[in-house]
Image (tube, rainbow, N blue to C red):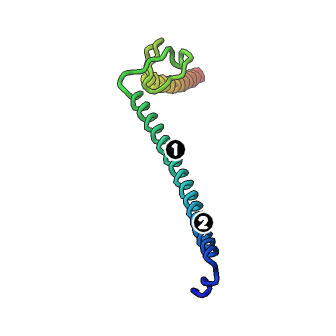
């Protein structure tokens, strides 16, 4: 190995050394480029993740603030051609809370069901009375 190096002149040795240093430097630059690129991509991904968390936290706090005891008031409700915003919304026009209205709707539906049932029972009683009157007339 020493013998082969001796054949080269001092200028050749310097050129070879410079070429080795340049190639090592180029290799390090390429390595650093990819390392920095990966780090930059990771930072962007982390930033997006943090922004998403912040957005979720903000929406959670907004929802939590909407859940307060004080009712939000809107101009009109569904019966006044307005969609309710939340369960805690109150309509200025009728002053009925959505939860109260939903409860009233349940009671109204129950009453309608009871009325239908009573109507069916009434029709059955009327039919039985007619049958009994027909039986009496036949006797």
Q: Nearer the viewer, residue 130 or 60?
A: 60
User: Which residue: 60% across, 88% down?
Assistant: 3
In the figure, 132 relative to 37: above or below? above
For the N terminus, the quadrant is bottom right
Viewed as shown, does residue 133 lie left or right of 96? right
Alpha carbon of mark 1 to alpha carbon of mark 2: how far?
A: 38 Å
For the C terminus, the quadrant is top right
Residue 103 lies in what quarter of the image?
A: top left
- Which badge, 1 or 2, is on the more N-terminal residue? 2
Q: Nearer the viewer, mark 1 or mark 2?
A: 2
User: Residue 99 location in percent, x, y?
Assistant: 43, 25
Circle 2: element type = helix
Residue carrying label 1: 48
Q: Counting other residues with Cα less than 10 Å from the Cα at mark 2, is it few (<14), some (14-19), or many (20 or more)?
A: few
User: Residue 105 location in percent, x, y?
Assistant: 48, 24
Q: Nearer the viewer, residue 50 or 23?
A: 23
User: Residue 90 location in percent, x, y?
Assistant: 44, 19
User: Which residue: 49% across, 14% down?
Assistant: 75
User: Which residue: 39% across, 28% down?
Assistant: 65
Residue carrying label 2: 22
User: Residue 59 location in percent, x, y?
Assistant: 46, 34
Q: Nearer the viewer, residue 95 or 123?
A: 95
User: Which residue: 52% across, 54% down?
Assistant: 39
Viewed as shown, does residue 130 lie left or right of 51? right
Q: Is residue 105 visible?
A: yes
Q: Counting other residues with Cα less than 10 Å from the Cα at mark 1, is it few (<14), some (14-19), or many (20 or more)?
A: few
Q: Is residue 128 visible?
A: no
In the figure, 121 relative to 8: above or below? above
Circle 1: element type = helix
């Amino acid at each position: 190995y020493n013998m082969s190096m001796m054949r080269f002149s001092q200028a050749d040795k310097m050129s070879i050394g410079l070429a080795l240093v340049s190639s090592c430097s180029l290799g390090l630059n390429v390595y650093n480029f990819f390392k920095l690129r990966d780090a930059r991509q990771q930072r962007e991904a982390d930033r997006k993740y943090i922004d998403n968390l912040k957005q979720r936290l903000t929406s959670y706090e907004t929802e939590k603030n909407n859940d307060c005891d004080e009712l939000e008031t809107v101009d009109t409700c569904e019966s006044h051609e307005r969609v309710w915003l939340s369960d805690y919304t109150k309509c200025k026009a009728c002053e009925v809370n959505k939860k109260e209205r939903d409860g009233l709707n349940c009671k109204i539906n129950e009453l309608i069901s009871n009325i239908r049932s009573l109507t069916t029972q009434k029709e059955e009683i009327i039919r039985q009375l007619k049958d009994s009157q027909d039986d009496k007339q036949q006797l």
